[in-house]
Image (cartoon, rainbow, N blue to C red):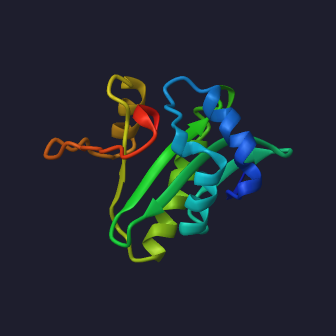
Amino acid sequence: MITIRSMTLDDYESVAELMRNTPGISIRDADSRESTARYLERNPGLSFVAESDGVIYGCVMCGHDGRRGYLQHLIVSPEYRRQGIAQALVERCLECLEGLGIYKCHLDVLKGNEAAGQYWRGQGWTLREDIDRYSKVRRGGENA
């Protein structure tokens, strides 16, 4: 049986392994243990894992800026997909954001990841066509 619970820093190695083993997931230097610790501390109780018998099969990281929520790294192991786990993880995040008075949430999908785009559209999310995202890296190169 899969249980969904809040993600803690103790989950980092399992989540990092899940990320490394999932095609279509981009891992950056900002996904380090130290950065993840800061993220979880800044956004307490907003990121979740799905586990069974102590093994993590899914995760989602969620944060906010006080006005909008942001989802990152929604991942479910291939053998556990199509069981509603991803939807349950996202719903937990959205419920928590709503409890904070945040009613809009954004996420990024890598260009060319058609499966992810199809999934999100199927879940009622809308592809924004009115904005482009720009990034500036001050240190660390392209993988920052």
Q: Is residue 43 visible?
A: no
User: Could you tell me residue 47's position as x and y percent?
Assistant: 59, 57
Up/down of 97 relative to 90, above or below: below
Q: At 62% from the left edge and 37% from the top edge, which residue is drawn?
A: 83
Q: Quadrant of residue 20?
A: top right
Q: Is residue 98 visible?
A: yes
Residue 69 lies left or right of residue 78; in this view the side is left
Q: In this rendered view, identify the residue nearer to me: 18 or 124.
A: 18
User: Could you tell me residue 77's position as x and y percent?
Assistant: 65, 31
Q: Quadrant of residue 66?
A: bottom left
Q: In this rendered view, identify the residue nearer to me: 111 or 116.
A: 111
Q: In this rendered view, identify the residue nearer to me: 5 or 14.
A: 14
Q: At 64% from the left edge and 25% from the top edge, which residue is drawn?
A: 21
User: Could you tell me residue 41's position as x and y percent?
Assistant: 60, 67
Up/down of 50 relative to 69, above or below: above
Split into 4 quadrants, where in the image is the N terminus?
A: top right
Query: Furthest residue to the front?
Result: 139
Residue 123 lies left or right of residue 31; in this view the side is left
Q: At 34% from the left edge and 46% from the top edge, which residue is drawn?
A: 124
Number of dots carrying numbers? 0
Residue 125 lies left or right of residue 116; in this view the side is left
Q: At 35% from the left edge and 68% from the top edge, which residue is drawn?
A: 103
User: Could you tell me residue 138's position as x and y percent?
Assistant: 36, 46
Residue 43 lies left or right of residue 129; in this view the side is right
Query: Furthest residue to the right?
Result: 53
